[in-house]
Amino acid sequence: MGLKKRTSKGIFFRKISVFTQAGIEFLVTVILAKLLAPTDFGLIAIASLFTIFISRINELGLGQALIQKQKLSYEEISTSFWLNLASGLIFFALIASTSPLTEAFFKMPGLAPLLAVLSINLILSALSVIPRTLLEKKLEFKKLAYFEIKSIVIFAAAASAFAYYGFGAFSIVYGRIAQRGVMLILLWRGCDFAPSTVFDFNKFRKLLRFGINVMLEEIVSFFYANTDYIVIGKLLGATALGYYTIAYQIVTMPNQKISIAILSVIYPAFCQAQGDNAKLKSGFLKVVRYLSLIIFPVLTGYLAVSDILILSIFCAKWQACILPSQILVVAGMTKAVGAPISSIFKSKGRPDISLKFNLASFALTLLAIFALVRYGIAGIAAAVLIASVISFLAAQYVCNIMLDSTYGEYLGNLKLSLISSVTMSALVFGIKRALLTNTTLGGLPLLAALVVTGILIYLILLYIIDKSVYKEVSEIYKEVRT
């Protein structure tokens, strides 16, 4: 099977997994928002930041290094496995033992035990790196989709049950551990690698030359992406962070669950085509086009119905989320279509470029946040928006140079989704105002009517402006089926 067909199949199955996970995650978030307090979400947000950060260091960039190498030996795989496990155990002990200091720094009572228990996931994550990497390298995304859906169902059931029985913030912690544990078992059952005592220092040094830049880029990327959470947690407290967490999750969920999932498919494909610049450019622009066709209407549509969605689904206690979530919409759009840029840099063997851009973006975000933090979580959302747009434009400029492309070509691939999405959003907003003024329709019935109307308007606009997009989707579907 050719690379194009395998990539198409991979994206198809990743989309199935992603949409299923996004739906379940959203449903669980709604359930937990009704059962837990904003402070609980704030505590979990800070605890999760530490474990996510350490898990990125924990991998040492070896997973992407293994994918980037076109020929891979057993010694390299075995060496990477033991390094990941050792770092997982070390960081678990470090985070668990220093959790009281973290609680004291953020002045959040109850954070220490949450962090200590959640850090168990660092060991489970370390054990998962190699089997997942090998499956991704082989483009076994149908198998991965099955594993991910099964594990997210376990999380949903566990977290909801624990929340119902009054476990508070720990309900999410226990749910995530159950999810990670199930995923670990499934990954090892689906992988043909068996650990041994082989450890080759020469192989390790070669892998680390690539991996260290990836790891540093991941660290800087983490701080760039989470500076807002850290500042809110430190300066504004757990309750404000809880509101911001829900606002941010609503807006960034399409990006996190769709664009990042697709990147896990295209990065191995880009690596296999790293010597063919024309093929890389064509693949990159197609990915950007399809991401925008999916994510732009979701976010612009949300902008039109955000007040009704939050008040009718999450209830009135989350009203403070409305304004910051609206501000973050454009940031979510730029992050979504900007996500594939890093894969181009890494596939070209230049993760150092991603590192430099993330360092600059982190500094810019930090400056903007401290300038606007006086305006609360809405001010921080505005800071994230400004930094995201500037960082995206700069990174895309360098990517254009590497691919011998132009902004004109890039924007040409966004034109259809942007025009259709913005027009749809404006029409839905107008319909909403008319219905609120002239009818008694409200709450969930109004939200459902607006969502259906928005989908229909968007599909009609796509057909009117460029109906060839339906032919493209049909061809991809046929490729996947065959």
Image (cartoon, rainbow, N blue to C red):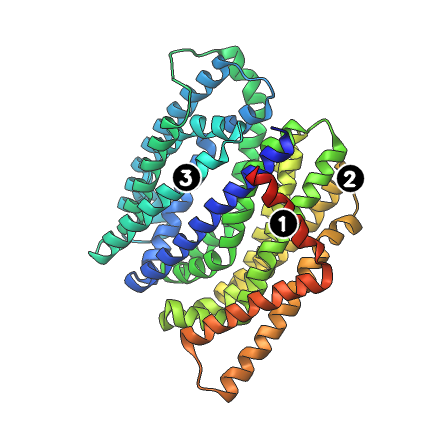
Residue at point 61% right, 68% down?
Answer: 457
Closer to the observer: label 3 or label 1?
Answer: 1
Residue assigned mark 1: 473
Residue assigned mark 2: 401
- How far from the left and from the top, in percent, is residue 9? 56, 38
Could you say whether the residue bearing mark 2 is in a helix, strand or loop? helix
Residue assigned mark 3: 146
Q: CA distance from mark 3 to mark 1?
A: 23 Å
In the rendered view of the protein, which quadrant contains the N terminus? top right
Let me know if residue 351 appears in the view.
Answer: no
Could you say whether the residue bearing mark 1 is in a helix, strand or loop? helix
Disc 2 crowd rating (10 Å Cα; few below 14, some 14-19, many 20+) is few
In the image, taking residue 65 as reference, residue 166 lies left or right, namely left
In the image, taking residue 127 as reference, residue 73 lies left or right, namely right
- How far from the left and from the top, in percent, is residue 108? 32, 53
Verify CB contact (< 8 Å) between mark 2 and mark 3: no
In the image, taking residue 168 as reference, residue 105 lies left or right, namely right
Image height of 287 relative to 181, above or below: below
In the rendered view of the protein, which quadrant contains the C terminus? top right
Q: Earlier in the sequence, mark 2 or mark 3?
A: 3
Q: Name the amino acid type tagged 1.
A: Val
- How far from the left and from the top, in percent, is residue 446? 46, 76
Q: CA distance from mark 1 to mark 2?
A: 29 Å
- Residue lying farthest to the left in this orientation: 165
